[in-house]
Amino acid sequence: MYLTGFHAIQERIKSGRPCGPLLVAKAGPRAKEIAALAVSNKIRLERTGAFELDGIAPDNRGIALQISEHRSGDDSGHADISLESFIADLENRSSEEPSALVLILDEITDPHNYGAILRCCDQFAVDLVVSRNRRNAKHAGVISQTSAGAVSWVAQAETPNLVRAMEDLKEAGFWIYGADMEGEPVYTMNLSGRIALVLGSEGSGISRLLRERCDGMVGIPSAGRVDSLNVSVAAGVLLYEVRRQKAK
């Protein structure tokens, strides 16, 4: 499996996560810069022809970075850590950092949305993204490019059971709020401390079982004529408000 976007490749190399070799067919200024970065990070370079690279990674810009195809988390950027280890680490440092921000994704199937959400998570310092290990977006190249490489930096955990994950977070002191058009205006809610936000799928929203376990629903007041915000845009607005309150 290969990453082809300049940002995606650059951020993956910087992150220190396993990758390589870097295939280089055209040595333009940006490709040279990334190749030098790869060398400095001890990632092997392989020169290849443009025709050959097009066959391997059709959307390339003269370079492509190979990443693992195994289910170690490197194929789609998912499953960096387990939820259990995240909670354990949080408890170990709770006296220093009593607050935390977790984003729970309930069947986000569009990789463009998934990548855009991860970019928001990087910008607003989300501590962990939790998703189901089935029925979520799994296209590494699109996710990495859409996230502008943020997928390499945002901690993620996969679980077979989001309901249980929510229960574990509650036991760890998290208040959990679901995103919903009819929810309470987000700026009226107290979102300090340990907060988890749930974002539902593009079509049907948050599933019933997850909705029933939320402590409340938050919404984004809108004066628009269109039905609702795209899920990745909504993620950005909600995460900004949480971080704004935590910065007080």
Image: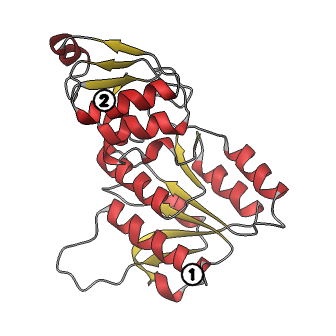
| Mark 2 secondary-structure assignment | helix
Looking at the picture, which amino acid does disc 1 mark?
Gln
Residue hosting label 2: 32
* Residue 63 or residue 31, whichever sits in front: 31
Q: Earlier in the sequence, mark 1 or mark 2?
A: 2
Above or below, 97 against 90 in this view is: below
Q: Which percent across, then down, holds residue 176?
A: 61, 68
Query: Residue 123: percent from the left, percent from the top?
Result: 46, 61
Residue position for label 1: 245
**Crowd rating for badge 2 (residues with CA inside 10 Å; few <14, some 14–19, many 20+):** some
What amino acid is labelled 2 in the image? Lys
Q: Quadrant of residue 139?
A: top left
Residue positioned 47% across, 81% down in the render: 186
Residue 140 spot, x, y in % from top left = 38, 33
Query: Which residue is at 44% across, 27% downward?
Result: 38
Depth check: 211 or 21 in front? 21
